Image (cartoon, grey):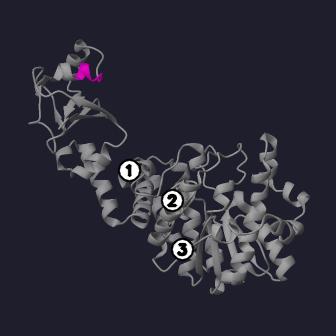
Amino acid sequence: MKLYDELKWRGLIKDEAGEDLEEKLNNGGLTFYIGADPTAESLHIGQFPTFLVAERLRRAGHKPIILVGGATGRVGDPRGTGEREKSDVKVVDSNFEKIKKQMKKLFGEDTLVINNYDWFKNYNYIDFLRDIGKYINVAYMINKDLVKRQMEVGISYAEFSYMLMQGYDFKYIFENYGATLQFGGSDQWGNLTTGIELIRKLNNQEVYAFSVPLIVDSTGKKLGKSYGNALWLDQNKTSSYEMYQYVLNFEDVMMDEYLRKYTFLTKEEIEDIMEKHNKEPHLRLAQKTLAKEIITFIHDAESYESAVKISEALFSGNIKDLKEKELMDAMSGVETYKLNSGENVVDMLVNTGITSSKREAREFISSGSITINGDKVTDLDMIIDKNLALYNKYVVIRKGKKKYYLGKFED
């Protein structure tokens, strides 16, 4: 398939604007840009397909520019669910540097990453109104879907003005970097077309835009940081193991769509995977394939292999095979307790709150439902001390089949 047909097949184009966009995409040679919001220090999994589109275009011979909105991030765009909190300026600046580093890791060190604060910081407010505000009709702005939704809950003048700022970004990058294409999430469509309007009116030039559908689950819930379920691309915020487990739990009904949008696998490869997956869905082949593709691209192959190793170690009980970093990744987010050396196992279970009483602790142990570092506890008089500890510090307690706790001896 040619690039345009592939993007359509993958479900990565929702809206489009500009004559001959299909031909332009297929021929290569365009300079394009996409935006990243610096109100967080990392991108998240919901944004990832849009950035993968940038990589698809780059591989097809187009030149990417990444715009991190240091200026627009200070204002906040309408999101249809209420006013954003005002972002701290120092945090926005710090996030710019972190996202810039993340972008260069994903797309290569030679990738151009720019900050719109550089051209907005000295732009006089009156001049901006005369130069830009004069050419965009308020009725045009109000008619945009996201603005309409935001007006139902209340929209500030600052957020209403965001559309003008992003529209000017396109004009500025067109004039100074030669970008003739912009794309972004479908919730940004009004902002994308505002840039086209400005360039048509003020530069008398034809430019292009398309939107990428937002990624949602089967209930329509958006995978994004604003909704409290973000999976960060930064390995320090979300480990490869956490990402592996998260993807492994994706719903079967979403897997064909996610494989198309989140991977570079071919149509034939995806069809083959889905055929095998549908025959034996309990094996989670589609989810495991997706996890491998995502983690290998975002982090690296070694991180993916480590995530699989951790998962298998927890399933089999071979906790002792894990390196300290892998153990910490595996136990990320579990309840952690301070341990007293020399304590009886029954007392330890009660004092930490893992069981509600000594009677319950004895029942769990007698039924083989308590393990320490992967070994089943059978002795009610077992002593918990540093001789048991992994890396002279940690004790991993499992109650039942899946509930883990981390005990820690103080130095």
Q: Residues within 10 Å of mark 3 (few under 14, many from 20)?
A: some
**On residue 191, which mark appears?**
none
**Segment colored magenta:** 349-354
Q: Residue at x 82, y 73 (%)?
A: 198
Q: Which image quarter: residue 215?
A: bottom right
Please, is residue 374 above or below residue 183 in the view?
A: above
Identify which amino acid the numbered label 3 is placed on.
Glu
**On residue 94, which mark appears?**
2
- Percent of width and height locating residue 334: 34, 37
Q: Which image quarter: residue 381?
A: top left
Whichever of callouts 3 and 2 sits on the residue coming sooner in the sequence is 3
Are discs 3 and 1 less than 8 Å apart at CB? no
**On residue 283, which mark appears?**
1
| Helix, strand or loop for disc 1 | helix
Q: Which image quarter: residue 344?
A: top left
Marks counted in the figure total 3
